């Protein structure tokens, strides 16, 4: 065998083999990164804490919108949020979705509210507002892997029109 022929053959084909192997390794690396990202992402679990005690719907004063009387309702709930994922996560917002029977689904954004204080016998129990810094609570919404946070959330739902157009 002529060394010059072997050298030329390797020079032409090794470049193609290296390019193909770089492409294959890049795809494998991307798939592994995707697998680890999906495995490690935050898995949030939101549950109301004792909804029979710490959850309230209440009517707010009526207002007027474009000549129509509005009906407004407040919703206050005590919720716990747990992170079952492998990454730390920080909550940016918490929204509530209300399904209406005869209307479109509505997204409610949370409002700031005063700190809730409940008298239990001679003791006062203070409930933190989720993500709100007060004198008694830091308002931190970062949740470590395997950790949890809790707090009160306050929403307002306002509608106008036919009285049957209320959320169910």
Image (cartoon, rainbow, N blue to C red):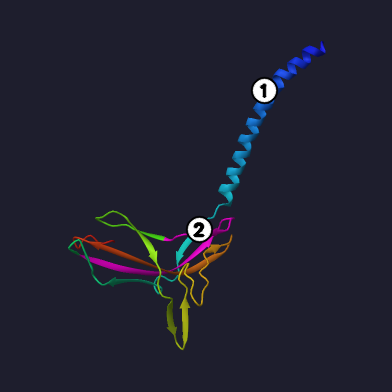
State the image quarter where residue 88 is shown.
Answer: bottom right
Q: Is residue 128 magenta?
A: no
Q: Is residue 17 above or below residue 85?
A: above
The answer to whether 59 appears left or right of 111 in the picture is left
Crowding at dot 1, Cα within 10 Å, few <14 / some 14-19 / many 20+, comes out as few
Question: Which quarter of the figure is the N terminus placed in?
Answer: top right
Q: Is residue 158 above or below residue 37?
A: below
The residue wearing badge 2 is 44
Q: Position of residue 159 (x, y in %)?
A: 25, 62
Mark 2–mark 1 Cα distance, whole angstroms, equals 47 Å
Residue 16: assigned label: 1
Look at the magenta stretch and give its main secondary structure.
strand
The segment highlighted magenta reads 69-94
Q: Position of residue 38 (x, y in %)?
A: 56, 47
Q: Is residue 73 magenta?
A: yes
Q: Earlier in the sequence, mark 2 or mark 1?
A: 1
Q: Residue at x 53, y 71 (%)?
A: 138
Q: Residue at x 61, y 35 (%)?
A: 27
Q: Residue furthest top?
A: 2
């Amino acid at each position: 065998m002529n060394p010059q022929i072997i050298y030329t053959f390797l020079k032409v084909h090794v470049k193609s083999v290296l390019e193909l192997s770089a492409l294959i390794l890049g795809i494998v690396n991307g798939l592994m990164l995707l697998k680890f990202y999906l495995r490690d992402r935050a898995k949030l679990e939101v549950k109301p804490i004792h909804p029979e005690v710490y959850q309230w719907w209440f009517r707010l004063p009526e207002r007027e919108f474009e000549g129509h009387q509005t009906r407004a309702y407040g919703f206050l709930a005590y919720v716990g949020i747990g992170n079952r994922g492998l990454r730390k996560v920080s909550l940016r917002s918490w929204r509530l979705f209300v399904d209406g029977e005869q209307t479109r689904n509505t997204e409610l954004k949370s409002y700031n509210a005063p700190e809730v204080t409940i008298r239990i016998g001679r003791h006062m129990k203070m409930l933190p507002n989720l993500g709100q810094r007060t004198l008694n609570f830091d308002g931190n919404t970062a949740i470590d892997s395997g950790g949890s946070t809790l707090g009160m959330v306050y929403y307002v739902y306002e509608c106008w029109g036919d009285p049957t157009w209320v959320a169910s």
